[in-house]
Amino acid sequence: MGLYSIGVDLGGTNLRIAAYSREDGLKDVIQLSTRRPNGRDAVIIDLCDAVESLCLRFGGIERCVGIGVATPIPRELPEGRLLNPPNLPGWEDFELRRELERCLKRLVIVENDANLAALAECVLGQGSESTLVLYVC
């Protein structure tokens, strides 16, 4: 099995975790409801379990070249601290990156969901040389 990466879309309603490789493209996606009423610990457990499940299916964590997480704003980057995301109540000043790295024992990159949507469209989508992504809140 080749190398792959994991991408996570952490939203207030849905949690999507995908494995991708250059050779195969999109390998698999796990889609879950974000269990906000159960608290952020439940969401983190779901997220980490899904990442680990994909890693097991595609050759282990050692073949994973990176884990990126798309999050809503506002946040502090590159620290990956969520400040006061309106669609994730109770996540104020949460050290998301640190908690995920502790759980997964891997480097995690946390970035703006709108920026990553634009990047994905440019790299994987049907966009042209010039792509504009408009993210409406």
Image (cartoon, rainbow, N blue to C red):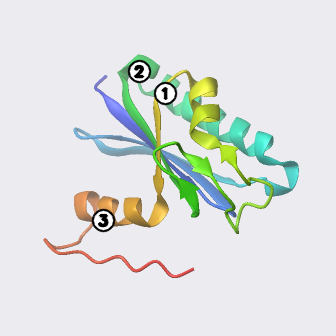
Residue 41 placement, left or right of 28: right
> Could one spot residue 60 in this view of the protein?
no
The crowding category of the residue bearing disc 2, from other C-alpha atoms within 10 Å (few below 14, some 14 to 19, many at least 20), is: some
Q: Residue furthest left?
A: 129
Residue at (49% x, 24% y) in the render: 106
The amino acid type of the residue labelled 1 equals Cys
Residue 134 placement, left or right of 129: right
The crowding category of the residue bearing disc 3, from other C-alpha atoms within 10 Å (few below 14, some 14 to 19, many at least 20), is: some
User: Looking at the picture, how far across and down is residue 129, in whole percent?
Assistant: 13, 71
What numbered label is drawn on residue 35?
none
Residue at (33% x, 59% y) in the render: 120
> Quick one: 83 or 97, which is closer to the camera?
83
Residue at (79% x, 42% y) in the render: 42
For label 1, the residue is 55
Label 1 – label 2 distance at C-alpha? 6 Å
The numbered mark, 2 or 3, whose residue comes first in the sequence reads: 2
Regarding mark 1 in the picture, which secondary structure is present there? helix
Label 2 – label 3 distance at C-alpha? 27 Å
The amino acid type of the residue labelled 3 equals Glu
Q: Identify whether 129 is placed above or below 42.
A: below
For label 2, the residue is 59
Q: Quadrant of residue 50?
A: top right
User: Looking at the picture, how far across and down is residue 43, in whole percent?
Assistant: 73, 45
- Quadrant for the C terminus in the image: bottom right
Label 1 with label 2: CB-CB less than 8 Å = yes
Q: Which is in the foreground here, disc 2 or disc 3? A: 3
For label 3, the residue is 121
User: Looking at the picture, how far across and down is residue 88, in whole percent?
Assistant: 72, 60
Residue at (51% x, 33% y) in the render: 54
Label 3 with label 1: CB-CB less than 8 Å = no
> Could one spot residue 75 in this view of the protein?
yes
Regarding mark 3 in the picture, which secondary structure is present there? helix
